[in-house]
Amino acid sequence: MIKLIASDLDGTLLPPSKNLPEETFGLIEKLYERGIIFVPASGRQLPNLEKLFAPVLDKVAIIAENGGLCSFGGEIIFTDPTPSDGVKYALKIIRGEKDLYPLLSCADCAYYESGFTPFIQTAERSYSNIRRADLNEVAKRETVLKISVWDGKPPCAEHGGKFLPPKIKGLRTMVSGFDWLDVSAPDANKGKALRALMQAVCASADECVAFGDHMNDLEMLQACGISYVTANAFAGLKAYIKNEVPSNADFGVIQKIKEILKG
């Protein structure tokens, strides 16, 4: 019996338009009636995800900030923050690179310092609560879940994702999308957050299904008994996960959820 279905959003559940498929909320309602909790698992911030899933917020659990926190039943049940010293250390390195723009993701708000308009416009599309501030000061007073870094010369996998990870020691630095990479605590990931949720709802790995499209989804996919990548997924992820659904443009996750409901 399936108890949890976790899905990445951008590149996985969301089509290229970045809008939730029309059937999403109806399917979440049907899953809930069957005793199955849907879990959006994203690099986005919690307020953004709560707004996106507002019509069914009482029927989902949320993994935000690429595993930095997990919310269930209106409460944060798990966090994995980035150490303050690590944040300051990583910021110094990131600021020394061209075309990389850092943003500090905290539980309730995200903070940026650059005045570069394309970066601000991109960040404001992804974060509901966001403001400009001195990031060093933010690191002193706030619990930082991760540093999100916008790459001004995408694809990130061919630019910042190549040269930045080796420079930042002792933290997890990973490409999280076409033009973003994340810096976080060494073992922070969606899989760790999902396992905390599994424990909270007494679900075993065999009772969980997951969908993803990029390397930041790997641990989440490995934590589940049944895992799928979308046809458009990053080739490196497909080397680990062999089960495949149609692409996000073809609503592969929606198709598979419908199959699960018929079973």
Image (cartoon, rainbow, N blue to C red):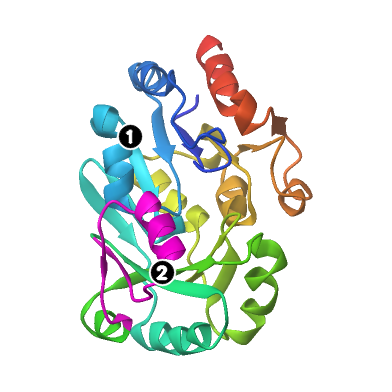
Q: Residues under labels 2 and 1: Cα distance? A: 23 Å
Where does label 2 land, which residue?
146
Query: Relative to 88, is 152 above or below?
Result: above
Three-letter amino acid code of the residue under disc 2: Lys
Q: Secondary structure at mark 2?
A: strand
Q: Secondary structure at mark 1?
A: loop
Specify whether residue 90 is in view: yes
Quarter occupied by residue 87: bottom left
Which residue shows up at 68% across the image and 27% down it?
246
Q: Earlier in the sequence, mark 2 or mark 1?
A: 1
Left or right relative to 254: residue 115: left
Three-letter amino acid code of the residue under disc 1: Val
Left or right relative to 101: residue 57: left
Q: Which mark is residue 238?
A: none
Which residue shows up at 56% across the image and 58% down it?
176
Where does label 1 land, which residue?
60
Left or right relative to 165: residue 198: left
Q: Split into 4 quadrants, where in the image is the C terminus? A: top right
Question: Is 124 a magenta residue?
Answer: yes
Image location (x, y in percent) of residue 210: 55, 38
